[in-house]
Image (tube, rainbow, N blue to C red):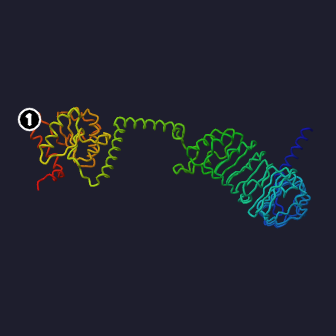
Amino acid sequence: MEMSVTLLVMVVLMAGAAWSHRTSIFNGCQIRGVRADCSRLGLHSVPKYLPVTITSLDMSYNQISRIHREHLSVLSGLKTLNVGFNQISSFDPWAFSNNSALEDIDLSNNRLPGAWDDSFAVLKSVRSLDVRNNSYISLHIPGSFTSLKTLYHLKVGGPNVTEMHQSVSEAMELEHLSVVTGNLTIYTRDDVFDCLPTSLQSLDVSNNEIQNVGNKLMKFENLKELYLSNNKLSTIPVQLPQALPWLKVLTIAGNILWTVEPSVLHRLGNLTLLDMKGNPFYCTCNIRHFVTFCENSSPLRIEGWPAEYHCSNPENEVGKQLSSVSFPTLYCDTTMKSVIACVTTFVCTALLVGLCWYLDALWYVRMTWAWLQAKRRNFLSDPDGNKDYDAFVSYSQHDAAWVMEQLLPELESHSVPPFRLCVHERDFVPGRHIMDNIIDCIEQSRKTLFVISQSFVESEWCHYELYFAQQRLIESRDDALVLVQLEPIPRDSVPSRFCRLRRLMARKTYLEWPAHRGKQALFWANLRVTLGRQKQQEPNNDAIASAPL
C-alpha cells in the first residue's frame, strides 16, 4: 500500500514537471510553463486570453504603441515584463493596477516622454526597471521614480536626454544605477558624477565618454561595483581604492589606459573582479608591474587575462599578449641603471683626468690661451705683420756662453748686412711676465733658432719656447724653425708632448756645431743661408745728421 502511494506521488510530480516544460503555441506566442514569449510577432497589443498562470511575459520587438489596463489585468501573478523595442508612447494611468507582483520591468527603446509617476504608483514590488533610450529629455535621479519604494536596479539615459539632476529620496532602496547617455559629460560643468546619488552600491556609467574620474566619485562610500568600460579614461586615480573601501568589482575595459601605476595596483587587493581588457597598453618597463600583478592576483579574478590583454606600443610588440613580453631586469631596473650610469661616468671621468694628467693637457690649455692672447696683442699693435727680428734664439742658460761669445758676434757683427737676433738676456722687456716676453719675441721674429743640447732638453723654460714654436709651425711653414745641435743627443730625449718637433727632427736637416775650427766657417755660412735674407736696417737718424754734405 505504501509503495503504491509512493509511485502515485512520483507519477504526479513527473507529470507536473513535464507540463511545466511542455511548449505550446497560443496566438503565436510560445508558452513554456509559466513563461510566455510573444516577441518579434509584429503585434500591436498584448494578446488576449493568455494563461493566467504566466509569471514572465516577453513582448519585445513588436509594434505596440500603448498599454491599456485590460491588457495585463488578468495576469495578476506577472513578475517579469519585457516590452522593450516597441513604439510605446503612453500607457493608462492604471495600466499596472492589477500587477502589484511585478518585480522586473523593461521599457527600454520606446517613445515614452517620461510622465509615468501615476502608472508606477501601484507597483509595490518592482526591483528592476529599464527605461533607457526613450523620448524623455529631462531626468531626476531618483526623483522621477520615488513612487517605486522597492526599486533596487535602475537603468536610465539615452541620446535624447539633455538634463539630468540629482534628487534625494531616503525612502527608496535604490542601490544599482546604470546610466547610458552616450556622453555623460554634457550634464555637468566640473564633475560628471555630480548628477548621481552617492548612496548607490552599484554604478554603471559605461559608454559615456568620461575622460577623468573627479573627486565626487570618492564620496560614493557604499559603492561595491563600479562599471566604467568603454569611456576615455587614461588613468586610474591613486585615491580611488582607498576612497571606496567596499569596492569589489571594477571594470575599466575599452578605455585608453597605457599602464597602471604601482601605487594603484597595491591598493586593489580588496577587489574580487577587475576587468581592464581592450586597453591600448604600452609594453615598456612601466607595464612590468601590471603584468606581475595580474599573474599573481589570486584570489582576485582578472577578467580576460591573459588572452585579451595586448600591446599597442612599441611597434615591435604590437599585438603581443602582455604576458608574453619579456622585460630584462637590467633594462628596466631604474636603480641598476642609475648605478651603472654613475659608475660609467666616474670611470670615464677618471680616465679623462688621468689622460689629461699624462698628456699634460692643462699645460697645453694654459699655453694655448697665452699664445692666443699674444696673437691678439700683436695683431692690434702691428696689423701689417712686420717683424722686428730675423730670429729668436732659444737656448738654455748652460749654453749662454756659446750664444753670447760666438753666435751673436758672428751673425750680428761679422755679417753684411748684420742679422738682428732676439735673446732673452738682452731683449726681453723688463717688468713684463716672462711668458709674455717669450710669446711676443717669437711672434716678432721671422724664425726661431733653437740651440739644442742636453741641458736644453732639461730646461723648463725651453719647453715653453718649444711649445710656442710648435704652435707657430701649425700656422706657418716648416722653415720658420732652425735647429742647431751643439752636441749629439738622442731624438727620444725630446719630451713626448712635443711630438711634432720630434717628427721634425727626424725628417728635417739640422746644423751640427763642429768641434774642429776648420769646419766652423762652413757652419756659419750654412746658418746664414738657413736664416735667409736678413732684415734690412733702417738708416740711423744720427748717422744721417752727421753725414758730410
Please indicate, yes or no, whether residue 30 appears anywhere in the rendered image.
Answer: no
Res 135 quadrant in image:
bottom right
Q: Residue at x 29, y 40 (%)?
A: 430
- Who is closer to the viewer here, 274 or 418? 418
281, above or below 144, in the image: above
Residue 383 in picture, x, y percent from top left: 29, 54
Name the residue tied to disc 1: 517
Res 142 quadrant in image:
bottom right
Which quadrant holds the N terminus? top right
Q: Residue at x 35, y 41 (%)?
A: 366
Please indicate, yes or no, whether residue 77 appears anywhere in the rendered image.
Answer: yes
Residue extending furthest toward the left: 518
Residue 480 in picture, x, y percent from top left: 22, 46
- Who is closer to the viewer here, 392 or 529? 392
Query: Along the horizontal axis of the image, is 184 left or right of 281?
Result: right
19, above or below 498, in the image: below
Q: Label 1's element?
A: helix
